[in-house]
Amino acid sequence: MNRQEIISLKLRPALAECDQHRLRLHSAWEEARTFEPFQVGFKGDFSDDQIKTLDQLMFRFGKLQDAIGTRLLPATLQMVQEWQDVEPFLDKLNRAEKLGMLPSVKQWQLLQTAHEYRDQPEIAKANLARLLAQVPILEKIHSQISQWAENRIYKMERR
């Protein structure tokens, strides 16, 4: 597969998918970060509407992280002929960081989705609060890889 085929068949769809997840994630994040149960000392629980927003937040966070790792990053590395199918994912992350695609391998590794603890609501709130704090990090990673890819596409198409 040549570079133009990679761009049209893999990279552009991956960019579009990631953009869609990021927009919906950001919307849920904007809403969720104001919820009273995240305020220090608040003893109440989340409303049903808040839970719907938090579900969307967790879902989109996972979908964006997955789409970046399984579609956007591979397509971007393939475009510049830096993808090796047989090497570990960590090596691919390190290569992406060296090329300036990824701000930090360590940041990527620290991202984690929240897990529910129905019988331990304080742990659930803490995990959700941690997830809220990680959304801007994931958005930064998405933005940097996307901008890097778009710049490369632009340069290639101008030739």
Image (spheres, rainbow, N blue to C red):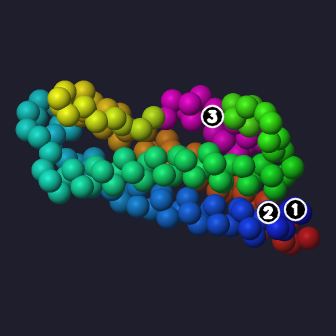
Whole-percent x, y for residue 34 in the image: 22, 49
Q: Quick one: SS at disc 2?
A: helix
- Camera-nearest label, 1 or 3: 1
Q: Nearer the viewer, residue 62 or 118?
A: 118
Q: Quadrant of the C terminus?
A: bottom right
Segment colored magenta: 93-111
Which dot marks residue 6? 2
State the separation of the CA atoms marked 2 and 1: 7 Å
Q: In the image, residue 120 lies at what x, y percent?
A: 19, 27
Question: Which residue occupies the extreme right position in the image?
Answer: 159
Find numbered disc 3 in the image and state the secondary structure of the residue it sits on. Answer: loop
Q: Main secondary structure of the magenta part?
A: helix
Can you tell which of label 2 and label 3 is closer to the viewer? 2
Q: Along the polypeptide, which appears first: circle 2 or circle 3?
A: 2
Q: Residue at x 41, y 38 (%)?
A: 113
Precedes in sequence: disc 2 or disc 1: 1
Q: CA distance from mark 1 to mark 3?
A: 29 Å
- x then y, percent, for residue 124: 25, 33
Report crowding for label 2: few under 14, some 14 to 19, many 20 or more residues within 10 A (C-alpha).
some
Mark 2 in CB contact with mark 1 (< 8 angstroms): yes
* Residue under label 1: 1
Residue 49 quadrant: bottom left
Circle 3 residue: 104
Asked whether residue 112 appears in the rendered view, the answer is yes
Residue visible at 49% across and 64% down? 20
Q: Which residue appears at 48% of the width and 52% of the height?
A: 63
Q: Secondary structure at mark 1?
A: loop
In the visual, does 55 lie left or right of 16?
A: left
Three-letter code, disc 2: Ile
- Residue at screen point 11% across, 30% down: 41
**Residue type beneath disc 1:** Met
N-terminal of the pair, mark 1 or mark 3, is 1
